[in-house]
Amino acid sequence: MRKLRHLSTRTKIVVAVALTAGLVAPTTAVAAGRFPPRPGTTVSMLPAGQDNPSIADGVAIGRDTAIYKTSGLGPGGLNMTAAAGTEARYIDPVDLIDGQLPPGVTITEAQGINVLRRIGENLARAGLSYDDVITMRVFLQNPADQEKMDFAGWNRAYRQFFANTSLATGKPVNVPLGSAAPAPPMVANPARPSRFALEIENLPVAGWLVEVEVDAAYPAKKK
């Protein structure tokens, strides 16, 4: 049984929304000349009037663009101090302090960070990086002590690796980890994929709360 909880949406050549002190350029004007994308490139349509949107409204993929698609990946079972098949098993020990999660960090947030690191490793083996991701599909399961998925915790994990730079300045934007004050992200990355997230009753591995698959575009070769 699948419950649709959230539908949302990024990419490669970013369609920046021009902002002035209170003037927002019409989306159609910003997009003029960008669609369809040139061969070998992608273009994302970003929400108007936002300096740091989390996702794109959609992504256009130009002809002859090479695309890499990952399988669905979950967090690695790295926490050997926790029993196999438990949610705690899928926390990366580097995120623990004296064996505990930092204040306010949820189990879904910790697993999200773990799985996004795995995504980065997978992309690197294919000659890609987080910056090349254009679409993302996220499947979330509710933690054992909760009635629904922890979408807020997932979003905090996501912002550590994606959509954490200012469109106006290009500089990283601080993001929160749990209940701590916002701080520099783990990976500064301007990429804003198109994205959806679903609540799933049962993920395929006991203890998983997060499964993610992404599509990434190989950058066009410079002539």
Image: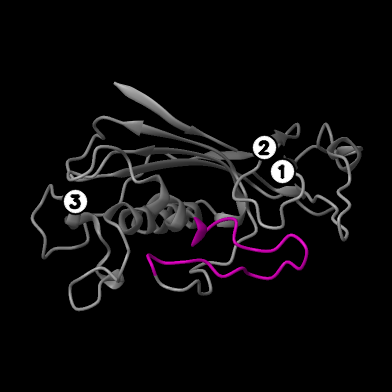
View extreme (front): residue: 22
**Mark 1 and mark 2 in contact (Cβ < 8 Å)?**
yes
Q: Residue 34's image quarter?
A: top right
Q: Which residue is mark 2?
A: 57
Report x, y in % for residue 220.
74, 48
Residue type, numbered disc 3? Glu
- Locate the N terminus by quadrant: top left
Residue placed under numbered mark 1 in the picture? 47
Three-letter amino acid code at disc 2?
Asp
The reply to whether residue 135 is in sight is: yes
Residue occupying the point 32% across, 65% down:
104
Report the residue marked by disc 3. Answer: 87
- What secondary structure is the stretch in magenta mostly built from? loop
Tell me residue 109's x, y (percent): 35, 56
Within 10 angstroms of label 3, few (less than 14), some, or many (20 or more) residues?
many
- For disc 1, the neighbor class at 10 Å (few under 14, some 14 to 19, many from 20) is many
Measured Cα–Cα span from mark 2 to mark 3: 32 Å
User: Is residue 177 covered in magenta?
Assistant: yes
**Badge 3 or badge 1: first in the primary sequence:** 1
Taking the view exactly as shown, the residue that stands out farthest to the top is 1
Tell me the SS state at disc 3. helix
Label 2, secondary structure: give it: loop
* Span highlighted in magenta in the image: 159-179
Of pointers 2 and 3, the one earlier in the residue sequence: 2
Instruction: Give left or right: position of 211 versus 50.
Output: left
The amino acid type of the residue labelled 1 equals Pro
- Disc 2: CA contacts within 10 A as few (<14), some (14-19) or many (>=20): some
Q: Report, in whole angstroms, how far the alpha carbon at label 3 lies from the one at label 1.
A: 35 Å
